[in-house]
Structure formats: C-alpha cells, structure tokens
Amino acid sequence: MASQPQIPKEMRAIQVVEFNKPYKINTVPVPQPSELAPLDLLVKVAVASNCHTDQMVSEGVFGRPLPQTASHEGSGTVVATGADVKGFAVGDRVMCGIPFHPCGSCKDCLGPESQKQYCMQLEGHIGVQRDGCFADYVKCDSRSTTKLPDAVTFQSAAPLACAGRTVWRAVLQAGLKKGEWLGIVGSGGGLGHLGVQFAKALGLQVVGVDARDEGLELSKHYGADIVADARKGKEGVVKEVHAVTNGEGVDATVNLSDHQDAAAIACAVTKMHGTMVQIAQPDNIVIPFPEIIFRDIRVRGSLISSAEESKSMLDCIAEHGVTVTTQPFQGLDKIGELTELVHGGKLKGKAIIIVDPEQVEHEKKIGAKF
C-alpha cells in the first residue's frame, strides 16, 4: 500500500469571485484528511478541463455563493481516503466524480444503477455548487469517481469526466445496434469528436453535422462516415443524410448543439419513429410539432454516466484507442489565455490546464497513451 503523502495546508485555486467577471487565482486552504466524510476522496489534481458549464457557473446561473473554485472536469491521484471508502487506495489514478454526496435514500439512489446520478437531493456537483478541479487538490465522492486503466492518460481523463461521460451515455441511450446509423449534431466540438469515436467503436455508422470549418474537419478526422455542413440549412442537411440512408434518415440522433435550429435539424435527419437524444442545454428546445406528432420522433434527455457506465467508457477507450483532442495550457496561471481561446470560437476539442506536470510525466512509465 502506498504511504500517506504529505499534504500542504494551502494551495492555489482558480475561482469565480464575482459573476460575469474574470477568474481570480487565490490562495485557499487544502482539504485535510481529517475533514473527509466517510466516502470522500482527496485527489491531487494532475489535469483540469474547461467545460461549457464553467461559463454558466461564472454567469451565476446556479446561484452558488462566491468564491467558487471552477472546473468540474478533473483527473489526478488519490492522496487520502475517507474511513468507509472501498475500491480506492492512496496512489490510485482517477477520473474525478462530479456528483457529491447523493442522499442514498431516494428512488434514484435506490433504483437502477444507471440512474443513481439523477439524485436531486445530493449536496451538489464539484465545480458547480462545490469547489472544483482548477486547484492543486480537490475533494470528490468515491461513489462517482472512476479508476483509470493504465492506458488512459490524465490529459484525456479530465475532459472525459463530464464531456466523455455525457456523450458516452447519450450514444448508449440512442439504443442502436452495430451497423445502424447515428447522427451527431455538433459532431466537431468537445463532446462531438468523442461521440463520433465512441459510436465507431460500438460499430455504428456516423453522420456528423457541424457548422464550423474546424468542427467539420475534426468530424472527418475522427471517422464520421458522412459530414454535413449545418450552414446549408435544414433542407440541405436532410438531403445529404437521406442520400446515404435510403431516403429514411438516421436511426437515431444525438444533439450536442445549443444553436436555435439544432434540435429541429436533429429531428429532421432522424427517420420516422426514431430517437433524438437531447444533450445541449439552451433556454428553450425548439422542435416543429410535425416532427413529434406526424413523424413520431421520440425525444429524450440524458445526463452524465453512472458509475458503471463511466467504467465501461474507460474500458472502451483503453480497448479501442479513443483519443481526446485537447489544447493544453501549462499551469493555473494560464487561465486567462485559456478563457480567451474558449471565447474566441477557434477551439478544437477541449481546453485543459496541466496542474501537476510531474504526474503527467510519471504516468508515461506505466504505458498511458490514450
């Protein structure tokens, strides 16, 4: 068993200190082992990732008291465990869990394993209502945290913590069999390029739809069988999709874009009686009524993966070599440059911060490569 690492009293953290204002880097206390609840983990962060939800947090959408340490996507090494933690030990490489302290007694917590992440009575989500991963250390819940296979790197695992878990479950929720067609609207973004790879790993044929040159390029690079430019409008996209699906449309679609026309396009390219899985979170989801009434498109939402779904995602990555396109920044001090890139519209994949380069360097010795 690994020896107990020495844990400092203070650390640096990127925080929201005022809504709609730039992040600040503050010195804050490090959670100590004595402060861990029975099922908590203390993780020394290796890599933390930016997500669209971070912008929502900084805008005050969730109404959390400030200051708030940002980022709910993180990976690192366990340095302390709560008294009742099972399946984790000091020294384990992990992808941090996002849900924190579910109630354990509601219908979701007691229901099927695949819906425990829906508990509405939990204490919060790290990086949203709880301090997150843009820091040297983070406290997370062992029940939603996932051990990393040796083949999966910290740099991939951080963005997978939310983006990967979300789009993996969305692909599963489409309910398709090998050889069937899956459409992905927003296929060249941070979630989309992962969704394309997951779908291909599961033996599906993929139609990627995007509205950016960078997104179209990334969709092709990661194996989309057909790529359609959403800038051609709904009719143009439908025509391209029907040309390769016998005039019927894809068997199911995942919508990852919050553009006002995206949900309508996602439904339009889906065959009658097919499923559209809505992941994007615009204020309103706009779908013309004929899609639902006359074409019987079934619309369903999906959240992040459950614990077992998360494990299956990492196993898939280790087996099939799914890779995450990232644009890394070295150190917490680079948060300004990261934010500028994210808001500039030219980001390919996910923007990440290497918080602890020593961990990243060390994992090469165990063969981490994806």
Image (cartoon, rainbow, N blue to C red):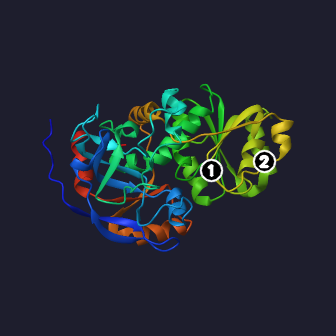
Three-letter amino acid code of the residue under disc 2: Ile
| Residue 353 in view | yes
User: Which disc is residue 333 wearing?
Assistant: none
Give above or below for 14 relative to 102.
below
Q: Is residue 189 left or right of residue 35?
A: right
Q: Viewed as shown, does residue 80 lie left or right of 151?
A: left
Of 138 and 152, nearer the camera is 138
Q: How crowded is mark 1: few (under 14 residues within 10 Å), some or many (20 or more)?
A: many
Q: Which residue is drawn at 61% across and 59% down?
A: 213
Q: Residues within 10 Å of mark 2 (few under 14, many from 20)?
A: some
- Expressed as whole percent of the image width and height from the top left, the position of residue 345 reads 57, 66
Q: Tell me which corner region of the image, top left, top right, bottom left or bottom right, holds residue 131.
A: bottom left
In the image, farthest residue toward the left: 3
Residue 202 in percent (x, y) is at: 53, 30
The C terminus, quarter of image: top left
Q: Is residue 181 above or below residue 12?
A: above
Residue position marked by numbered label 2 in the rendering: 287
Chain-order first, disc 1 or disc 2: 1
Question: Which residue is at 57% across, 61% downward?
Answer: 61
Residue 156: percent from left, percent from top: 39, 47
Question: Element at badge 2?
Answer: loop
Residue at the location (58% across, 36% down)?
A: 171
Q: Decide if residue 116 is on the left or right side of residue 152.
A: right
Position of residue 358 relative to residue 122, above or below, is below
Whether the residues at callouts 1 and 2 have beta carbons within 8 Å, the answer is no
Query: Which residue is label 1 attached to?
Result: 280
Q: How far separated are the C-alphas under marks 1 and 2?
A: 13 Å
The quarter of the rendered structure image containing the N terminus is top left
Q: Where is residue 150 in the image (x, y as percent from the top left)?
A: 29, 37
Q: What residue type is labelled 1?
A: Ala
| Element at label 1 | loop
